[in-house]
């Protein structure tokens, strides 16, 4: 019965694949011929809002996605995330297995990407099977596909499998690990709460004449912060010096983000000041981590000051920064500042979700800013006419 169900599921998926033309799926004008980039953009736009699993697969097939394109890799990831949320695992399997038959995808790059996609879906055994099938598919196996498999274990949250694969597979498949292999294994230990095991990997790297890089140490620092082993953070920073490495932007960002997650945003802010003294230029991630940290701790004035400082230093806030600040300002009752920042964000076509915007509109009404609330509702309806009905109840209250 299980075999019949699988065959039937596959047949239905394939039947849908041939029932619609790619143009009619990706564009309202079926006669329009789209370039590959236009197909990818159309696919991504549709994937963001589509909920029907079969239609998600139709969109991906119509776009003829390939991991060679950054935009297509985003499409693959969005599609697999949505299918995983719908528990549509058989659809994911059929889709990826069908892609393996495409002549243009018979290469290690695609196989590595499909291994990662299986990991993203939590289908680790399929990822391992794909790695082991490479010879049958006529594809030469290198350290790149091994690293993809190790990374797949991490995103599937199967860190114990990393140990087994790292120990067994290089010997079984005659693959020499590289620096990325070691860094991925250290990351797995750190995410599993076993950061001290990173020291043994460092020792092995030394025995095999592999020089650790900034990523090696940054992974360990992140793990030790997570476990609140602050002495070890200091030890790793000393090890960096011994290996001739100075902490750069990525190291500072990990330290700042880690401290903010622990509710120690003022310590993180001191690190920002230290960066500037050493002429290391912070980026939007640096500031966003700090702003989020201060907001979570209820220190909205500090968050607003950092936002202003960020802009004054020529660092452009990203969507995450805008959305975080707007949300927490509404939570803290500072609706006027939230409105000002929301307008800036919307001008850039970065629009917070309905829940946040509804909270802002309701908040403006509560502080006697009904006109501003009406203006904001009109702006949102103009941006998203398909969602106009969501504002019906709010508009009725505003008109009273």
Image (cartoon, rainbow, N blue to C red):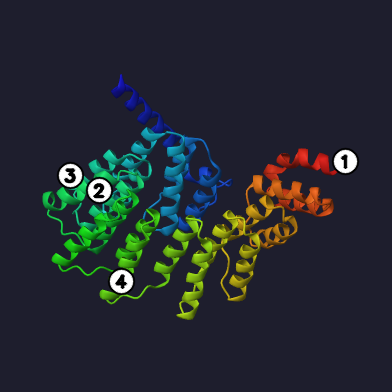
Mark 4 surroundings: few (<14), some (14-19) or many (≥20) residues within 10 A = some
Q: Which of the marked residues, 1 or 4, is nearer the chain's N terminus?
A: 4
Q: Residue visible at 63% across and 53% down?
A: 328
Q: Residue visible at 51% across and 35% down?
A: 52
Q: Which residue is mark 4?
A: 238
Q: CA distance from mark 3 to mark 4?
A: 47 Å
Up the image or down, 98 lies above or below 323; here it is above
Q: CA distance from mark 1 to mark 3?
A: 71 Å
Residue 262 vs residue 56, the one in the foreground: 262
Mark 1 surroundings: few (<14), some (14-19) or many (≥20) residues within 10 A = few
Q: Which of the marked residues, 2 or 3, is nearer the chain's N terminus?
A: 3
Residue lying farthest to the front in this orientation: 231
Q: Which of the marked residues, 3 or 4, is nearer the chain's N terminus?
A: 3
Mark 2 surroundings: few (<14), some (14-19) or many (≥20) residues within 10 A = many
Q: CA distance from mark 1 to mark 4?
A: 66 Å
Q: Which residue is mark 3?
A: 136
Q: What percent of the width, then of the height, locates residue 379? A: 74, 53
Q: What percent of the width, then of the height, locates residue 96? A: 34, 42
User: Tag 1's secondary structure?
Assistant: loop
Q: Which residue is mark 1?
A: 400
User: Tag 2's secondary structure?
Assistant: helix
Q: Which of the marked residues, 2 or 4, is nearer the chain's N terminus?
A: 2
Q: Residue visible at 80% across and 55% down?
A: 372
Q: Tell me if residue 104 can be seen.
A: no
Q: Which residue is mark 2?
A: 162
Label 3 or label 4, whichever lies nearer to me, is 4
Q: CA distance from mark 1 to mark 2?
A: 61 Å
């Amino acid at each position: 019965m299980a075999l019949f169900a699988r065959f039937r599921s596959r047949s239905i998926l394939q039947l849908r694949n041939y029932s619609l033309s790619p143009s009619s799926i990706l564009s309202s004008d079926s006669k329009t011929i789209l370039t590959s980039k236009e197909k990818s953009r159309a696919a991504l736009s549709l994937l963001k809002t589509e909920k029907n699993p079969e239609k998600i697969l139709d969109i991906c097939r119509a776009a003829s996605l390939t991991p060679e394109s950054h935009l297509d890799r985003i499409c693959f990831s969005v599609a697999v995330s949505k299918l995983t949320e719908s528990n549509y695992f058989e659809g994911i399997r059929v889709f990826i297995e069908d892609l393996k038959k495409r002549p243009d995808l018979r290469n290690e790059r695609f196989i590595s990407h499909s291994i990662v996609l299986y990991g993203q879906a939590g289908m680790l055994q399929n990822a391992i099977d794909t790695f082991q099938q490479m010879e049958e598919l006529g594809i030469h196996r290198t350290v790149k596909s091994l690293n993809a498999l190790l990374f797949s274990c991490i995103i599937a949250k199967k860190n114990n499998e990393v140990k087994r694969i790292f120990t067994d597979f290089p010997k079984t498949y005659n693959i020499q690990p590289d620096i990325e292999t070691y860094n991925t294994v250290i990351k797995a230990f750190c995410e599993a709460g076993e950061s001290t095991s990173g020291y043994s990997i460092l020792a092995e790297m030394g025995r095999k004449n592999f020089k650790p890089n900034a990523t090696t140490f940054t992974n360990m620092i992140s793990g030790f912060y997570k476990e609140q082993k602050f002495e070890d953070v200091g030890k790793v920073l000393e090890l960096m010096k011994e290996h001739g490495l100075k902490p750069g932007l990525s190291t500072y960002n990990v330290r700042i983000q880690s401290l903010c997650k622990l509710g120690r945003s003022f310590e993180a802010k001191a690190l920002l000041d230290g960066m500037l003294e050493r002429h290391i230029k912070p980026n939007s991630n640096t500031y966003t981590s700090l702003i989020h940290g201060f907001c979570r701790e209820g220190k909205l004035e500090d968050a607003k000051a950092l936002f202003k400082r960020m802009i004054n230093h020529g660092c452009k806030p990203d969507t995450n920064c805008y959305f975080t600040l707007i949300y927490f300002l509404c939570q803290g009752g500072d609706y006027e500042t939230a409105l000002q920042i929301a307008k800036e964000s919307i001008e850039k076509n970065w629009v917070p979700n309905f829940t946040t915007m509804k909270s802002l509109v309701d908040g403006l009404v509560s502080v006697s800013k009904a006109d501003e609330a009406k203006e904001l509702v009109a702006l949102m309806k103009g941006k998203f006419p398909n969602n106009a009905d969501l504002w019906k109840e709010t508009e009725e209250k505003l008109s009273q």
